[in-house]
Amino acid sequence: MTRQKDVKWWKIRNQSLAVASRNAGFDLAIYDQYSKSVRNELKRLTIKEALRNMRDTFWEVSNERDIKDISQGVYVICLSDPFCIKYDLGPSNIIYIGIGNVFSRLDSHFNKSLFSFMRSLSGADFDFYLTEPVHNTSEDYYKHIEYLMLHRFQDKIGGGKYPLLNKNAGSKRSIDQIGKGWDTPLKQTGKRPAWSLHPTKHWKFENLD
């Protein structure tokens, strides 16, 4: 039997919504002081700038691949150090695990609730892990990787819960041979985070599923 290839992850580090907004010609810190029409334009142009920067960064870290070509990907959205979320079994940077066409999914997430979530943490940057896992025999490998990651998170970090912006359990496939490295974003680094955040009763952000 041919050995299954390891799962390789790319990482886009330290993405800042505030910087994207500034590059688009706005100041995110005074978002609420703008008129509704200006806020709408700020959001549209900031998301466009954030996605452009992610696309450019991915081109660099992936040896000149276009993120728009990753159609069967797995991706993880995280808070950058030194911030993390306080989950029931310990801290983690992870806020969402997803699959699909990475660029279009992120665009959809930003327009759904990710923009508002990131704006509420304007002092925090965000990291994105991406992979395009290829299996020797199964085209649904990426779906199974998402399923495994969500359930490993649930068991080892969330205390029965999924990441902050996840709701669905993923889709299990009958795949026995899994490449090493599929759980890289889940592994704890041993760092002691300077800031551990926890949702309050006023939490109102929509899940990204």
Image (cartoon, rainbow, N blue to C red):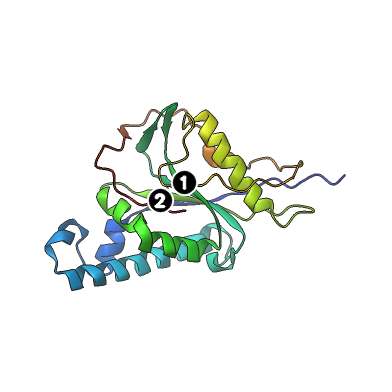
Secondary structure of the residue carrying numbered label 1 = loop
Residue receiving disc 1: 167
- Above or below, comparing residue 63 to residue 164 in the picture: below
Callout 2 touching callout 1 (CB < 8 Å):
yes
Residue type at mark 2: give it: Asn
Q: Residue 87 carries which label?
A: none
Give neighbour class at mark 2: few <14, some 14-19, many 20+ (Cα, 10 Å). Answer: some
Residue located at (31% from left, 70% from top): 44
How many discs mark residues in the rendered view?
Answer: 2
Label 2: which secondary element? loop
From this viewpoint, is residue 51 visible?
yes
> Residue under circle 2?
207
Image location of residue 127, percent across then percent down: 43, 49
Question: In the shown orientation, is residue 104 left or right of residue 141?
Answer: left
Quarter of the view holding residue 45 = bottom left
Position of residue 15 measured from the top left corner of the image (x, y, whole percent): 37, 54
Camera-side residue of 207 and 43: 207
Q: How far apart are marks 2 and 1 (CA)?
A: 6 Å
Q: Where is residue 141 shown, x and y percent of the image?
A: 69, 51
